[in-house]
Image (cartoon, grey):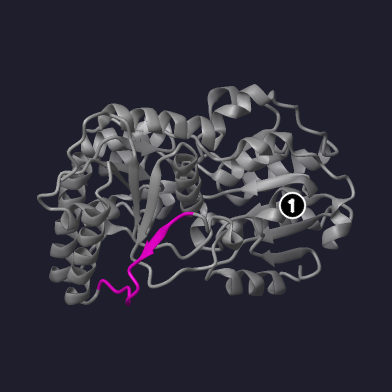
Amino acid sequence: MNKRKSNKINSIVWFVSTLSQSGGGERLLFEGASFFINRGIRVKVLTLETAKRDLFNNRYDNIDTVYYGMSNSYNNILEFFKKLHFTRKTIKLINPDYIIVQSENNAIFINLALVFIKIPIALFIFGQMFQFKNDLTKYAFIFKKQFSLIRNSMEGYKKENPATKHIISLKKRLGNEIIAFMRYYFVKKTSPIFVLSRQVKWEVQKLYNKKAHVFKGAVPLEILNYKENKKIRNKFGLPDGPMFFSLSRLVPKKNVELCIHSFKAISTKNSTAFLVIGGTGFHKKYLEELVDNLGMKNKVYFIGYIPDIDLWDYYSMCDVFLQLDVADFNIVFYEALCLGKKIILSVDTEIDSWLSNKENVVMVKPNINSVINAMERIISENLTPPLKIEKQLLKQYTWEYNYSKVLQLLSSNA
């Protein structure tokens, strides 16, 4: 199957095991699928989810998505093989020119499903294993030589990953070694590989001895033409005063707790300042209780999921955007940047060198003193509007620009 007469890409299957939240990885997938569809390429998203979820307020409902439709548990061996069979059968039926997968674990699954079927596989690495505390494959023997080098290359990595990890159970240790070997083997079989930063490009070279291509897509072109409404706060019932804004999944890795503790120090000195926290996640209840215990319920607003129709307005309203995630890349940073906001950003997030010279971005170490100092500095400057960045420079971060390069690479590799 998959005998082709030219390098033209006519059909793509985009495989992702889970598709259950409106996050950055899901945005990357749907924007990519939309781009290819607009270029006349047939795209099917294939997922092991049981049923359709309400993602991004159904904005991407025009994208054809195939669901597994049964329970989604890897604990049951029979269930796992049923999923392999479902995936293999579906892809054989579609017979795409290319398969795109998101994450190294999805690369393992899709290669197991397609044994003896020759279809080229491209890989997006959206978040590397050193960014996730619970991903223990980094401690496996096959990655041992590079572990300390990579761990020590970023402040957030050292915080998230202990220097040693003792996996007590022999069964779990063996399982971890097997998964790590499969990750190494199957990632090496994929091409091209796309990453979101030069940092992870370097990590991929060290871990897998593979070349990766940096993908910087984060915003649609139309964001560059957004018109700010000076009275927009009235629409959302937010007060006057300096507004700090954080938007992310509410999980420990995002360091929203650090935002709250840092803002506490600012709020005692500036009575009109307030913090808006957008997003959902299992950490929300803990964060709400923290705010309550700190006596800041009237200074911190949890607004939950922000629909796309309101998202740019929230950026527009804020004076300072906070992003302290342990991550090499953040879509929300580029959204705030394109909307002309001042941004406090973790040093773990990679930005291009020309941006580091702009007053728009204040880079901080992810600790309370650094964040407080940055907040105080911006407040003391009377929230001076950031420098306007030329649209031509910002276009390099659009989905359209970056997926055009992806399509060129897929065509040349097909």
Residue 312 in the image: above or below residue 397: below
Find residue 222 and report its horizontal and vertical position in percent: 67, 37
Occupied quadrant, residue 229: top right
12 or 267, which lies in front? 12
The residue drawn where x is 66% and y is 34% is 361
Q: In this view, does 106 lie to the left or right of 281?
A: left
Residue that numbered label 1 is attached to: 314
Q: Where is residue 306 in the image (x, y as percent from the top left)?
A: 67, 60
Residue 70 visible in the picture: yes
* Residue shown at 60% from the left, 28% from the top: 395
Magenta region, residue range? 63-74
Q: Quadrant of the C terminus?
A: top left
Q: Which amino acid does label 1 sit on?
A: Tyr
Q: What element carries label 1?
A: helix
Compare residues 82 and 41 and report the one nearer the observer.
41
At horizontal 9% and vertical 50% (from top left) the residue drawn is: 116
Quick check: can you spot residue 357?
A: no
State the residue at coordinates (19%, 40%). 188
Q: Where does residue 85 sit, x and y in percent of width and height?
A: 19, 65
Position of residue 245 in the picture relative to residue 230 (left or right): left
**Who is closer to the viewer here, 67 or 133?**
67
Was residue 229 drawn as part of the magenta stretch in this picture?
A: no
Q: Where is residue 68 in the image (x, y as percent from the top left)?
A: 32, 69
Q: How dense is the environment of label 1, judged by Cα within 10 Å: few (below 14), some, or many (20 and up)?
A: some
Q: Looking at the rendering, which quadrant does residue 46 occupy? A: bottom left
